[in-house]
Image (cartoon, rainbow, N blue to C red):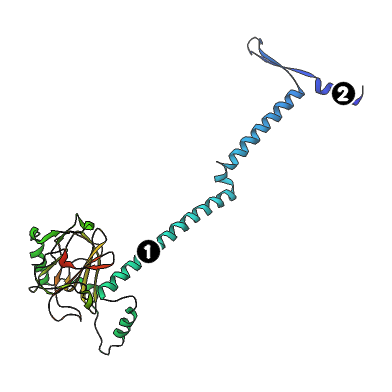
Amino acid sequence: MGLQQKIKNWIENKYLFVIRREEDFSVITSLSINKIKVGLVLVFTLLVFFMISLILSRTLLASWFDPAYQESENMKKIYSLSQTVDSLLVEVEAKDRYLHNIQQIISGETAGDSLTQRDSVVERADPIRVPTSEDLYKKGAATQEIIDEFEAMPPDEGSFQQLNSSSFTETFFFSPIKGVVSARFDLSKDHLGVDLVSEENEPVKSVADGTVILASWTLETGYVIAVQHSNELISIYKHNSVLLKSIGEPVTGGEVISVVGNTGEQTTGQHLHFELWYKGNPLNPQEFITFD
């Protein structure tokens, strides 16, 4: 018998796979197999196992064991965080520019003369004491009495009127103070608001609902507070003797925010300098508010 015949017999030899009951050895089932069938079953089983392993290695198992997959996911997260940080930086820069413009408006500066004015302050021979944040919001006994008195007062409903402009059809303004107009709005003289003379320790009120965006002290205008309202409107109050609100505090129309004073270099007596700004442009307050 040649080698080829032996191999053929070895492949074609059949085997009977029998399952019997243990009690009586009766046949339950039987299966006739040979080495070819066994080989095909093994190949098919290995192929299925390989395909399942390949799928798992690219999905579920990859997050546990594959360093390349983990690195790819980390890079995606880093890129997403980088995009978020870039967006936040853009927003912060825009807010910084916005606040800088507001400070320039309040101090009476423009973009071109801000450095000149700063230099002139530095060159002064006489030292000037700039109030600290504690000075800015300190409340003495007399001031506290004023606060208690005027916070208990109901808003004067007769002191506001509705704006005629279509941009402010739902906006009402309270008069910021009870006083007499001593200087009117005049763009030709760079007087971008109105001056109101009042009694001593007169409370200054917010003209409408909003949020305090500036509460500071400047050399020219003393204690200054500004309120951001809806419709891109900003109201500014200068030369106060004390500020009663800080940055970020919400205020309602008619709420007391400061006390009239005589602070800053650009003043010759106790009064309130009041300004209204809309989208970066000054408005004449007397066109929208009736002052007593």
Image quadrant holding the N terminus, namely top right
Q: Residue at x 27, y 72 (%)?
A: 105
Residue 39 placement, left or right of 5: left
Q: Residue at x 32, y 67 (%)?
A: 98
Image quadrant holding the C terminus, namely bottom left
Residue 135 placement, left or right of 118: left
Q: The residue under label 1 is which amino acid type? A: Val
Please tell me which residue lies in front, 154 or 143: 154
Q: Which residue position is annotated with label 2? A: 6
Give the structural element (helix, strand or loop) at label 1.
helix
Mark 2 vs mark 1, foreground winner is 1
Please tell me which residue lies in front, 139 or 30: 139
Q: Position of residue 146 (x, y in %)?
A: 9, 68
At label 1, counting other C-alpha atoms closer than 10 Å, the crowd grade (few under 14, some 14-19, many 20 or more) is few
Q: Is residue 3 above or below residue 24?
A: below
Q: Which residue position is annotated with label 1? A: 92
Q: Position of residue 29 (x, y in %)?
A: 66, 13
Please tell me which residue lies in front, 52 or 26: 52
Give the structural element (helix, strand or loop) at label 2.
helix
